[in-house]
Amino acid sequence: MAEGSIGYLFDENFSPKLVSILRFLGEKGLDTVVKKFEPGAKDEDWIPRAAEYGYIFITLDRNQLADESVSRVLLNARARAVFLSARFSRTGRWDQALWLLKYWPGIKAQTANLQRGEVRFVRWDGKVTARPPRRRTISPRNPKAASNKHPLSQMKLMD
C-alpha cells in the first residue's frame, strides 16, 4: 500500500470474489488477508502487521469481539477495524453482493478517516456506528460485568 493512502484489508471470512467486484468497479486499495499474508494466517500474526501497514480491517467475524486474546491483539496493535453485520454471513452470495454494492460507498466514506485504534460496526441497514450491537448472550443478572472487562471496551469508540 502506498504511503498516505487508505487501504482496506478484508479478512479470510470475506469472499475474495466480492472484493474483486469492488475492484472491477474501480475501487483502489483493497486487499485480502489471504493474498497479503497467507491462507490460514493467525489473527495474532497478521493483525499487528496490517495495523502497521495502515490498513482498515474489514471483518465478518464477530467472534473476535468475544475472543479476549484476539480483542487484546486488536487493542495492542491499535488496529482500525470495521465489523460488518452478523447477518451478512448468513445470507447468500447474491444478497451479499447486492448489500455490498448498496452500502460500500457509505461504509468507505464513514470509515476512511478512522484513527488508529478506532472501531466501527455496520448494521444490516448500512448504518455505521461506533457502538457494538447489543449482545444477547450477556446475563440479564449482571449485564455490565462482561462488557466492562472486555479488551475492546478500551478501544476508541468515538461518534
Image: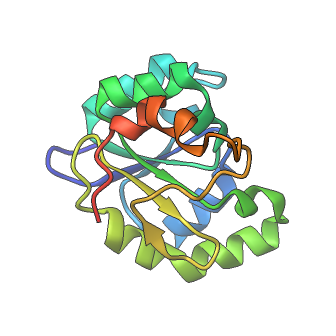
Q: Is residue 1 above or below residue 87?
A: above
How far from the left and from the top, in percent, is residue 96? 72, 68
Q: Residue extending furthest front?
A: 141
Residue at horizontal 82 percent and vertical 65 percent from the top: 91
Up the image or down, 40 lies above or below 105; here it is above
Image quarter in which the N terminus is found: top left
Residue in the image at 63% along x and 44% along y: 62
Instruction: Kindly indicate the quadrant of the structure image that contains residue 13.
Output: top right
Between 83 and 92, the one nearer to me in the picture: 83
Find the residue positioned furthest to the left.
4
User: Residue 63 location in percent, x, y?
Assistant: 66, 37
Quadrant location, the C terminus? bottom left
Q: Tell which of 60 and 136 is nearer to you.
A: 136
x and y percent of residue 100 in the render?
A: 60, 72
Image vertical order of residue 30 relative to residue 48, above or below: below
The one of 36 and 13 positioned closer to us in this rendering? 13
Tell me: 14 left or right of 26. Answer: right
Confirm whether residue 53 shows in the render.
yes
Asked which quadrant contains residue 105, the reply is bottom left
Residue 26 shows up from this direction: no
Give the total of numbered labels: 0
Image coordinates of residue 18 in percent, x first then y, are 65, 61
- Quadrant housing residue 67: top right
Name the residue located 64 percent from the left edge and 25 percent from the top edge. Answer: 39
